[in-house]
Image: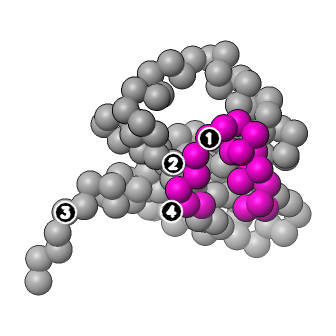
Amino acid sequence: MKTAFHPLRTLAVAALCALTLSGTALARDIGDTTSTNHRYVIQRSFPKGALDGLDAATKAKVNQTNARFGVKWLMSFANGDKTKTFCVYEGPTEAAIREAAKANHLPVDSITEVPVTLDAH
């Protein structure tokens, strides 16, 4: 049976695979119980052109606001026309992620906690 190609699902899978392949400090040992932060992928929808003005000052302001909620923006991936992003965050709770997004006036389509890292090796 042939499965239909779905570009957004493919982008999300690619984003998560890139995280596991990056070898960065994003991955925590599954047995690590000392960390109070959890890792989340946030999907957002934007009007076309909304991300065109994203500069270092805007990113710094988002990070400053996030810090008030104990939230850290790690990285984001965008589709080709920059109308969807898949953002990787760390934070204490999903509620903290949502509050930081609200304070930053950022949309949230969905939040998925991703506690498990699948290593390609």
Residue on which the image places disc 2: 44
What residue is at 33 percent from the left and 55 percent from the top?
8
Q: Amino acid at mark 1?
A: Leu
Please name the residue that numbered disc 1 is placed on.
106
Dot 2 amino acid type: Arg
Residue 108 vs residue 97, the one in the foreground: 108
Residue 48 placement (x, y as % from top left): 37, 32
Q: Secondary structure at mark 3?
A: loop
Residue 97 lies in the magenta-colored region: yes
Binning the other alpha carbons within 10 Å of mark 4 as few (below 14), some (14 to 19) or many (20 upward) gives few
Res 119 label: 4
Figure coloring: one colour
Pointer 1 or 3: first along the chain: 3
C-alpha span from label 2 to label 4: 26 Å
The spot of residue 93 in percent (x, y) is: 78, 61
Between the residue at mark 2 and the residue at mark 1, the CA separation in whole angstroms equals 8 Å
Amino acid under disc 3: Phe
Q: Alpha-carbon distance for marks 4 and 1? A: 31 Å
Query: Which of pointers 3 and 2 lies earlier in the amino acid sequence?
Result: 3
| Residue depicted at 17% across the width and 69% down the height | 4
Instruction: Identify residue for label 3.
Output: 5
Dot placed on the residue nearer the N-terminal end, 2 or 4: 2
The answer to the question of whether label 4 and label 3 lie on touching residues, with beta carbons closer than 8 A, is no
Q: Earlier in the sequence, mark 4 or mark 1?
A: 1
- Horizontal side of residue 102 vs 48, given as left or right: right
Secondary structure at badge 1 equals loop
The reply to whether dot 1 and dot 3 touch (C-beta < 8 Å) is no
Magenta region: 93-111
Spatial CA span between label 4 and label 3: 24 Å
Q: Are marks 2 and 1 in contact (CB under 8 Å)?
A: yes
